[in-house]
Image: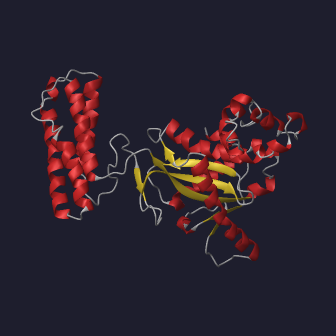
Amino acid sequence: MEWLLTINAGQRAGTVQDDHLKKVTVDTTVMEKNIAHPTDARLYETARHNLVGPAREAGLRLRQNYNCLGPRLCGQVGRFAHARQFKRMRKALRRLKGYTGRVLRDIEQQMVKVVEGPVESLLQDLMELVNRLLAQKPKDRKKLHSLHEPAVDCISKGKAHKRYEFGTKVSVATTTSGGFVVGMRALPGNPYDGHTLHEALEQVEILTDRRPDMAFVDRGYRGHGVETVKVFISGARRGVTRTIAKLLRRRSAIEPMIGHMKNDGRLTRCPLKGTTGPSRACKHALPGNGRPLRGPLRLRPQYPHDSEAPKGVSVLVRLANRPWQTVQADRPGPQENGNRCLKALCKANLLRRD
């Protein structure tokens, strides 16, 4: 799916020039997974509930399933925390954890009665996750934050309004002049930003058929170790000319680009499961596809007929003028059209490499 980020469409439409590809800006953001905010009480109660259902399907007779006491106690934990009664909250958490542990041990003792099949494999996977949940400590690394998304990472970007984000880190590369997206890739495991720069620049080189001369990054990329490209870090003083200082000030222009992709391109939350396959290729790359297409599509009001548009833009105008690709009449706009034209542009071979 990353081949959809090819800049062929932008070059034909004239929205990106070859000189712009010499200088790129690289930054990272977080694409959150579609999970609830992980709290101990919610995780314990969800684990108990997920164990009781498959155990009933397998024909196991549990001594007690805590279907009444569990949800009630989970709500009490939140009320105790809100009232700042932390001693009562910790006591309720210990009881709730005990409920989950009792159900887990009861199922483990009766696993010999379960017939091999999908229910048996589901129970095995659930018991492995619940054992991991019950054994983890508050300050452990690689904690379990969700039972249906075990690979979710806890990432702190230093935001005042959102201290922690739970999802996958995404690397974004744009041209310094024009802000054309030339690279986007998911980075599972919450790696250090400096260790991801080589991979991001390598993707840019593959998609643009040329290696950038300069890369501008923030201070989180210190210690990157890239020697093939001149990397300039924000706030540097040594070897910075007036031209480089001007380009470094331009580096912050990638921040609103990421914000637009989050708000308009659905980069805010990923509903796909896992960190490989469609979740990594499609959901993290498609917001980068829609963003460059909005530049050519802004020319649509100037060229109501595709015959009047310049070469390269005529295909975009023709696709945007089709009724089945446009949005409702009360909400027209290039942003929506850009997202809806992705499928048609792929069919027209406009986003594929020559």
Query: Quick check: 109 left or right of 350?
Result: left
Query: Quick check: 284 left or right of 65?
Result: right
Residue 153 is situated, as x and y percent measured from the top left of the image, at: 41, 52
Residue 65 sits in which quadrant? top left
Query: Quick check: 245 left or right of 101?
Result: right
In the rendered image, is residue 347 in sight? no
In the rendered image, is residue 283 in sight? yes
Furthest residue to the bottom?
A: 237
Furthest residue to the right?
A: 308
Q: Residue at x 47, y 56 (%)?
A: 191
Furthest residue to the front?
A: 330
Residue 304 sits in which quadrant? top right
Q: Residue at x 70, y 37 (%)?
A: 329
Q: Residue at x 13, y 29 (%)?
A: 110
Q: Could you tell me which quadrant the C terminus lies in?
A: top right
Residue 306 sits in which quadrant? top right
Q: Nearer the viewer, residue 17 or 316?
A: 316
In the image, residue 103 sits, relative to residue 167, either above or below, namely above
Tell me how many marks there are.
0
Residue 55 is situated, as x and y percent measured from the top left of the image, at: 20, 29
Q: Residue at x 37, y 47 (%)?
A: 36
Q: Nearer the viewer, residue 135 or 226?
A: 135
Residue 276 is situated, as x and y percent measured from the top left of the image, at: 48, 39
